[in-house]
Amino acid sequence: MGIALALSMLVILYWGLVDINQVKENMSKGAGRKPSPWLKNRDASQGGDGDGTVPLPPLSEGRGGDLGAEEVVLPRQAPPTAEVVSFKAFKKPNVKMGPFSYFKAIEPRANMTVCGLTYAEEPYVKVTTEADHRCKCYASHCDDIDYPRQSYVMLQVTGEGDQSKLITALQKVYSVHSEKPGPGSNTVETIVHSNGLRYPAYNRVMQGLVANKVDRDGYQRNSFLIFTEKGRNEEELRDGLIRFSNGLKVSVSSEEDSFKGLGMMKSKIEAHGRDTSQKCKKHHSYDNSFVIQYYKRPRNIVQIVKRLKAQKGRNEILVNDDSGTEVGVWIRELEKGTPIRYTVVVSPNIHEIRGYNRLAKLAQGKLLVLMQDDDYPSNAGRWLRHAHHLFKMNDKLGLVGGFTGTIQGGPLTNKYGVGRAPIKFKSGFRQPFMFATLVNMGPFFIRRSYFLESGMFNGNFSCRGEPGIGFDYEFALRTWHLGYHVGVFKSEMDYHVGDWASSGTRRNRGLYKKRQTIERRNTRYHKGTYGPYDPKQCPNCLDMYYRQGLHGRPNQFSTPYNKLKGVGIKVHDLNYALKKNASQF
């Protein structure tokens, strides 16, 4: 106990001696620092505040008003051009793949702007290379699977006949698929939209493509089956699936024309086509997009759908069925009773980070509500109205967590929310809310425009099919780093319902041990990226995340306000402003 106390005092003394102003001065001069990987230097002349941030568009015109349409910007686009792929004589691309490094993408990908929203490249930080945790992606690089060279979107595939057209098309696609490591790699993904095709039939088609199990697993690892409500506009559907795709090039074809366009490859920007006023009106026409990550919890489906359908507003429900086990149940419940716009994606166990990112690109709601399959939303809509109130009152609010939030350092050091300390303050909505340094997933409320522009969640925080422990903390820190705010509020959900304790990654010791390994590795990444700047030990650190208070530990301590550094200062100042005048929030 005495040793722990002595160490704590030394740390406090060290922080007291460090001149934060000198550190900031070094940062402003460069001091050999690499630029931020996500934040482009935007000054006031480019629509920013002069501090490197750009204000977020409000959810509606004015404060406290009804939800309105966001401003529509119609950028000029070049006329579409196509690259023809010959399936019989396919030439493998000669591309040099450089060594992996922090903040360096494997291959540059242009950001896509659609109706005023920027669909930015995901932040690329390689964090899965440690000896105790390597991703298993067979012969290929895992990055070649997540970001294939080609995406094939196949529309309106019916369940009629023997699916011979679909089989022929898939055989052509996978004839150009190669997972050899290095320049010879040419991975592809298929995105099939069902217009009557049932999942069991589609699965039989995939199983029958090749006899070799390793090759078959490789094909299925990048195959997606999409279900939507009947009558969705075909242009809207096509554009959504183009955004959903992750390939450098994309082709769009339909069963109606026997997949004739299968070999016509275009960039995603060209394939998406020109923005029109009518198209952009639909692109911003929904209030809320409820995005659900699902894996084998069938008992919860009925209540989740029922409660979400009870919410007021123009809403849509998007589900990533990662297990592919309850596709029919989801569709049955979504089509029962009150009609609602829905999308069910059958994914090859890509897990939550990739699932949320993919579905966010399909969504059309102004507010993304990212949920998990063991949480029930309240039938009453107060929680959703409160969330909208928070975003309308604060144009720089980027993320609100509905589970727990943490402040590490200063008089407010603690963990707040469900099962923890009560949230200390209230917003102008007269419900619990406060700003927090970090927030835990389940649920997340994010302005869609901000989520897309920020690059979404960091996919390198987990391998496919594994939990991305810590991705929520990283996104919270990145949000603060980009100049926006993070908060936690009472979302009035029923948490961890059903058999949550005996399912998921906690269901056996092996999986739980791997979960703990991932958590330790990703925690080191938080410190090594956002932690205190040091020219020798951490020259790339962003100098914003100082763990100056540890809650619930034997060596707990809390830094006085006048000794705070980094984001802790801003978190406290915002909370004190909230306490003083809640009506402004």
Image (spheres, rainbow, N blue to C red):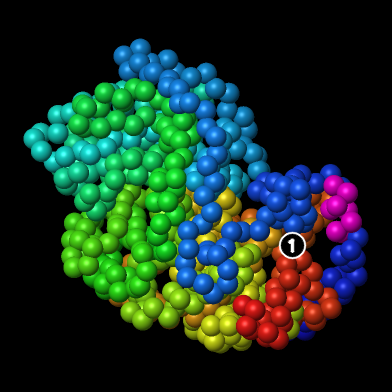
Residue where numbered disc 1 is placed: 544
Please identify the residue farthest to the front as the structure is shown: 277
Say left or right for 528 vs 417.
Answer: right
Q: Is residue 418 above or below residue 147?
A: below
Say left or right for 320 vs 383.
Answer: left
Quadrant for residue 276, please give it.
Answer: top left
Badge 1: few (under 14), some or many (20 or more) residues near its Cα, within 10 Å?
Answer: many
Query: Which residue sits at x=48%, y=26%?
Result: 79
Residue segment shown in magenta: 23-30
Residue 23 makes an appearance in the image: yes
**Image position, residue 584 (x, y; %):** 65, 79
Q: Is residue 69 magenta?
A: no
Q: Quadrant of the N terminus?
A: bottom right
Query: Which residue sits at x=72%, y=47%?
Result: 46
Q: Is residue 28 magenta?
A: yes
**Image position, residue 310 (x, y; %):** 30, 74
Q: Quadrant of the C terminus?
A: bottom right
231 and 489: which one is in front? 231
